[in-house]
Image: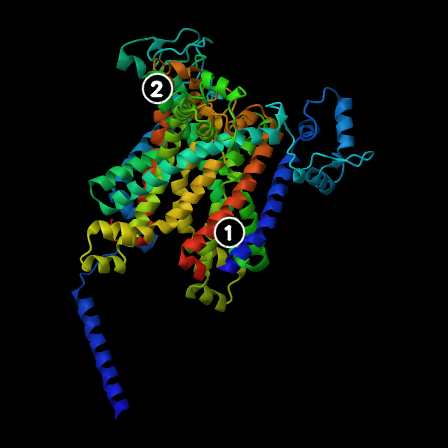
Amino acid sequence: MSTYILRRVLLLPLLLFGTTILIFGMLSFLTPTERSALWVQNIPRNERQVEGIIRKYGLDKPIYVQYYIWLVGNKDPETGEYEGGLLRGDLGYARSASQPVMDIIKARLPNTLDLAIWSVLPIVVIGILLGVIAAINHNRFIDQVTRVFSILGWSFPTFVFALVVLMIFYAGLGWFPPGRVSDWANQVILSGDFHTYTHILSFDSLLNGRFDIFLDVIRHMILPVITLSYLNWALMLRVTRSSMLEALRQEYVTTARSKGLKESVVIFRHALPNALIPVVTIAGFTIVALLNGVVITETIFNYPGIGRAAARAALNLDVVGILGLTLFNGLILIVANLVVDVLYAVVDPRVRLS
Amino acid sequence: MEKQKNNTDESKLVERRKQLLEVTLDGLPERKIGRLERALGPEPYRILKGLITNPLSIVGFFILAIFIFIAVAAPVLAPPRKAATAYRIPRDGFHPTPQEPGTVWESRPPPVPFWYEPITGKEEWVHLLGTTSGQWDIYYGIIWGTRTAFKAGLTVTIAVVLIGILTGSISAYYGGRVDNVIMRITDIFMSFPFFLAALTLSTILTPKMGRSILPAIIALIAFGWMGYARLVRGDILSVKERDYVMAARVIGAGDRRILFRHILPNAIFPTLVVASMDVGTYVLSFAALSFLGVGTEVGYADWGQIISFARDWITDLADYWFVVVYPALAIVFFVLAWNLIGDAVRDLFDPRLRGTT
């Protein structure tokens, strides 16, 4: 297994490098005016300013020099100080939000994280449960119902499901509003008394002992969580079902049954743990996908996460902004995929051996 | 002594095996192999037969047939004002408040279809499914949006399959360094979240190419081919080891001939199946992109965009439900049709489930 992990880790720098190349390739489609957002926040007002930026940041130099400058930053010839630079954590300015891309990420990643944490539990637990129920009742009525349920979930566009949910629970019943928190809660949060420990609002409100704010946060997150859950249950359910069906046909299950064990023991102690191995990967990828910001869901529920920032940048044709966010997400994804793969190898001895 | 015993055992075994073979072969009813099965080969025939006997996929084919009819008959179902601008949804004024289904067209109605008067007995063309905010006709948008959905879904699918076959087969056939480079490139493309990457690329392409359905389609293709490349590569690697490929090589067939005549036809089938399952996903992604306002110009007949008009009325959706519900039904049924077929295919293909479902 150690060679497998080692190989994956050694590939990591190559992947990261390739990712930056791809993003830089897309950047080079842009006009100098658009690309100037990498270095200055304001749109240059006239030709002379554009030319000044081109000269200062070497936008007329050979492509590999430009890549190098983009990566490590631009060195000021007089002071010797560096400005910008990907490796120094500078992704340029998102003009659609009038702030540096890194500031957007810092401000919004905790929100996206908050939503991801609260979505994972229902997705994984209920998804697995439904999959097990479907597998136990293979080809019976319940199986067909869950099957239709999962195909429907698979066929629903996120934006349609989200809008319908919003239509029913917000416009119709008025139970769960979109957004992040109510105004009164926001005022409390912005006032000096509210301490930020983790930046994740649902945890912070509990740590501050403000149970009312916690409830308000949850109330705003219920609809996005429902949306994300329903759409992801489909996959979870399918994978659990087919892998459970396979596990139930194994000989050790027959052995367990013939020993006279109770059916529930056979299912939950013998079959399920083995059936869960492929589910672990899917769960891992689901978490990664949730972390990557769920563009549509956040946009419709007006939830201030990374996904909505990306949608806004796209709508305003703010290319540097959205490229920065995509690059950041790509880097997260690469590392997260590595972790998931390694975990998979740890969990499943069969992978380890091959 | 011992050796002799072994010999007799072996001859007994051979005898027994002969008996068994005869018994089983005699006991089996003879199965007729029809002309279709002979033409398609056993595996595609089995899939095809499974598809037309499975109730879920029959429903899928039925829904799909309706959509094909709508797409083909669009000029008759919803006649455009001018054929050249058929994909632009006609507006009835500019008022921001959506109008109920059945409201009469007021300003510049498009031609009334011939079937309308005999069925309803009225002469005036109405907004059959209402209008969105900004008075775009929902019915017209759904009808012509069907064509957009087919165009986008099929173009993306065909393109990603072709690119996948090309890169995958080069990768598998040449192996070594070529394989390594191509696979690392797919890794890099895969290290971006699919939707976000497509959103980014179409944002970049839109100002360069002008507003049309092309930027979104190209973006979906650019970040969609990798799975197919890997799939084709894997299939070819397994087919490559078969005896008939070796035989072809022995009689001196060239690289290209072996690849195109012997390996690809046998490796391609699973890829096509996966592709049929993915059409729905691509239509969804395309609709989601245009929902976010990337790609097509405002008022283009496209389901995602019609739904996006509803976002201004979220608080009043209880009154203006039709703005969401009708286009939503179109998308859901369209994707559902593909997924029902794809789901049946997947079960037919899963060797673990063979004989159980």
| Residue at image mark 2 | A175
Residue A39, position in %: x, y? Answer: 70, 30
Q: Quick one: A315 or B32, which is closer to the camera?
A: A315
Subunit of label 2 = A
Is residue B199 visible to us here? Answer: yes
Picture quadrant where residue B145 is located: top left
Residue B261, position in %: x, y? Answer: 46, 57
Subunit of label 1 = B
Question: What whole-number distance in Å separates the C-alpha atoms at marks 1 and 2?
Answer: 51 Å
Mark 2 closeness class: few <14, some 14–19, many ≥20 residues within 10 Å: few
Is B264 positioned to the left or the right of B337 in the image? right
Q: Which mark is residue B151?
A: none
Q: Quick one: B335 or B200, which is closer to the camera?
A: B200
Q: Quick one: A164 or B112, which is closer to the camera?
A: A164
Q: Quick one: A216 or B329, which is closer to the camera?
A: A216
Residue B251, position in %: x, y? Answer: 48, 68
Q: Are marks 1 and 2 in contact (CB under 8 Å)?
A: no
Residue at 37% across / 34% down in the picture? A229
Q: Amino acid at mark 2?
A: Trp
Picture quadrant where residue B344 is located: top left
User: Of discs 1 and 2, which sits in the foreground?
Assistant: 2
Question: Number of numbered discs present?
Answer: 2
Mark 1 closeness class: few <14, some 14–19, many ≥20 residues within 10 Å: many
* Label 2: element kind: loop
Residue B229, position in %: x, y? Answer: 49, 49
Q: Which mark is residue B168?
A: 1
Q: Amino acid at mark 1?
A: Gly
